[in-house]
Amino acid sequence: MRVLQYRIPQYKDALVLLLREVLNRIQFRYNQAQLEELDDETLDDDQQTEWQRYLRQSLEVVVKVMELLPSHAFATLFPVLQEDLDVYLGLQQFIVTSGTSRRLNITAENDCRRLHCALRDLSSLLQAVGRLAGYFIGDVFAARFNDALAVVERLVEVTCYGSQISLYDLETAVPSVLKPDLIDVHAQSLAALQAYSHWLAQFYSEVQRQNQSRFISLVTSTMDATAPLITAKVPEKLLLSACHLMVSMATTVRPVFLVTLPAVQNIFNLITESQTRRLPQEAHMLVCRALSNMLLLPWSNLPESEQQWQTRSSSHASLLAALTRHYRLLRGTANQPPHRLGLEDTKAVLHQTLPVLRDIVDSISGESTKSRQICYQSLQESVQVSLGLFPVFIQQPDVTDEMLSFFLTLFQGLRVQMGVPFTGQIIHTFLSMFTREQLAASILQEGSAGCRVVEKFLKILQVVVQEPGQAFKPFLPSIIALCMEQVYPIVAERSSPDVKAEMFELLYQVLHHNWRYFFKTSVLASVQRGSAEEAMENEAQFSAAMQAFGQSFLQPDIHIFKQNLSYLESLNSKHKLYHRKLFRTSMLFHFINVLLQVLLHKSHDLLQEEIALAVYNMASVDFDAFYSAFMPEFLNGCQGVDANQRAVLGRNFKLERDLPSFTQSVHRLVNDLRYYRLCNSSLPTGTVKL
């Protein structure tokens, strides 16, 4: 690429020509016959149609040329976009209103075909313009400001126009063709404008203390274009584009005045007051995220004293109170058995409310402490209702799946705000509800909602055991017991890949983050020669965990094998696991033996290098013992070879201590042993005395 940068002047004309040719090839006005042949209905493995893949690959070329020749690329692309925009913006003169119906008075077949081509091309070019947004921000913001402003102002104009005259709602002469075209252009104009949200954020930062009128005008017009589309009457493709644009304005741009705009206030009223005509679930979730973020996220470029947290906290509490109104009414039913509740109605409320709350928490989990504090204050009552309802629905896996997803998000994002006593109450409730019978019933239905419930429960416990400090240490014995005495016996001899993976992840996190629960002395003291051996506690639990890891290496699941091998290696790297007396004296050779057997059986050939490295790390704890004690015992135990062959294998296994040579010796041993067995098994019976 650096060589090309020096030669750009030499290739400039060719690159501009390439850009023009690519733009022509994606436009129906120049290439209709070819483009009409591309399938735009059947999705491939990447969830793209043939047309979408062709367009995406073509736009990659446009972006590459933009990277090398930004000003030339922009000068080529923008006029082409303008031509199709002029056609689109001129449609208003053809709208005829008759009573309540509105139709587009373009009926001639030729005119309809030309309009179809222009709209398809405009949609493609809007995507191209959106892809270029990244080349107007950062260090080049000032130098390319005028070009970017021209684009954004044009996009704002187009989105406002589309929303004001509701082109998506027109009757057309060819509704199966032109209506989808009009919807797509409107949706793509919103998506292209969304792509410039980072540019708008930088613009806001630059003009924060200066004349903001131009910026305010752009944001106000954008919200005026977006708000009328936030309704269930609008086609979903267009509705979701509007929702995503609104989320970006609230999350990326974050203007102080956004929440006060009349258009935004209308959306607040729609969401909080009208519960009868709900938006589709995804759109509802996006709008709620946007409204919540407007109130929770710190405003850019303003000191803490000007953030108006008190007012925003009050507004956020009101928003959440409205969103959870029906859910909080379930509190009174927590002590009643489900069949008395109008179960399906209760489930509907749960499934509508909890995903929205989860999304709100998730969107601010990495934000400032103040944002998270306000969020939890607003959510507190709903969290308590959820905990009260949990035992009622323990036999309803689809509901507990939703509830545990919510609690997992809370633990990941707001556990500090929840406080130790309440967090402890939640853990205690969960541990008491998940009995052996309950776990077995859930896990044995692989891929079911019940199985997902157990996975999420284990994920929650992973978060708990990683918490520093002593607050949750009293739960460790119960958590380890749950793993080893309740979950492990169920999954040990079954595939159960998802639950098994989460259980071993939990065991690893218990060991890694709570090493001193098992070993009291420091790592330094334990590896110093001549120092006293470390004091070991909870030995039985540690041994059971190691045995479970060892057992997993005898199973066919290569993903669990790889995961668990990496966990052991990590524990050795961070805590000198292989050097610990208990592991060294009673487990080390067993693990090496199992790993060598895996290499011999070729069951996990994809992991040859990882296995050989682990064998080296284990053997290097005490090379003398490995060569003098383990290897003779290993070879004596090998089936399918005679005494002479064992002796040859032993002589050929050199006493290497560096990794490359040792690994080479291991692979040679495995290959030779496999070769001898193959030869011996193919000879007549009695030829070789084994």
Image (tube, grey):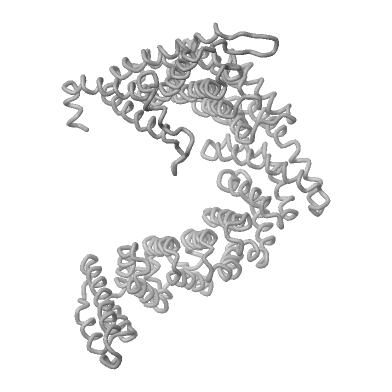
Point out residue 246 in the picture as x, y percentages from the top left corner: 55, 25
- Asked whether residue 575 appears in the rendered view, the answer is no
Which quarter of the rendering shows the N terminus?
A: top left
Taking the view exactly as shown, the residue that stands out farthest to the front is 109
Q: Return the residue found at the far top.
A: 93
- Residue 685 position, x and y percent, is 30, 91
- Horizontal relation, residue 78 to residue 427: left or right: left
Q: Which quarter of the rendered picture does the C terminus lie within?
A: bottom left
Question: Is 143 situated above or below 600?
Answer: above
Q: Which of 122 and 160 is in front in this view?
A: 122
The residue at the far right in this view is: 340
Residue 282 screen position, x and y as percent: 60, 35
Question: From what the image shows, is residue 340 above or below residue 129?
Answer: below
**Residue 582 visible:** yes
The count of marks equals 0
Q: In this view, does 382 lie to the left or right of 16?
A: right
Task: Name the residue rendered at 22%, 88% in the picture.
Answer: 644
- Tell me the residue at 73%/27% (across/down): 274
Residue 202 position, x and y percent, is 43, 22
- Residue located at (28% from left, 25% from top): 65
Toward the viewer: 611 or 65? 65
What residue is drawn where x is 45% and y is 13%? 85
Q: Is residue 130 left or right of residue 183?
A: left
Residue 433: image quadrant is bottom right
